[in-house]
Image (cartoon, rainbow, N blue to C red):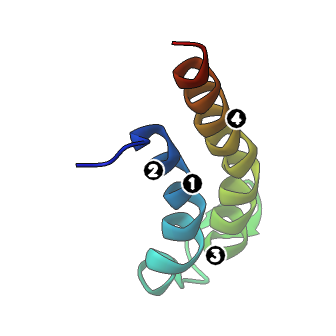
């Protein structure tokens, strides 16, 4: 179906930031002293480089084969 399925990792930040946002738009509960929405955005920001790295690594391995 896809020629480069590893690039689907690049959809993770989009889903974390925009796709799930209506579900996590809450002030309560608090996590680590932050409203849940702020905690969610912080977690999504920290997971974005990991998703980009996984897409890059998979694409690089595909280029070697």
**Residue position for label 1:** 10
Disc 1, SS = helix
Which residue occupies the foreground of this view, 10 or 43? 10
Q: Which residue is mark 3?
A: 37
Q: From the top left corner, tell me how far across and down residue 56 is, in percent.
A: 67, 35
11 displayed left or right of 64: left
For marks 3 and 4, give the CA distance. Answer: 25 Å
CA neighbours of label 3 inside 10 A, class few (<14), some (14 to 19), many (20+): many
Contact flag, marks 1 and 2 (Cβ < 8 Å): yes
- Name the element at disc 3: helix
The Cα–Cα distance between marks 1 and 2, rounded to whole angstroms, is 5 Å
Q: Which mark identifies residue 53?
A: 4
Q: Secondary structure at mark 2?
A: helix
As drawn, the label of residue 8 is: 2
Looking at the image, tell me whether mark 3 or mark 1 is earlier in sequence order: 1
Residue 28: give x, y in percent of width and height: 57, 78
């Amino acid at each position: 179906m896809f020629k480069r399925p590893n690039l689907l990792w690049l959809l993770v930040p989009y889903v974390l930031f925009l796709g799930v946002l209506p579900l996590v738009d809450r002030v309560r509960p608090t996590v680590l002293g932050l409203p849940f929405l702020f905690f969610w955005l912080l977690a999504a920001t920290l997971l974005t480089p990991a998703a980009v790295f996984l897409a890059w690594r998979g694409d690089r391995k595909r280029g070697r084969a």
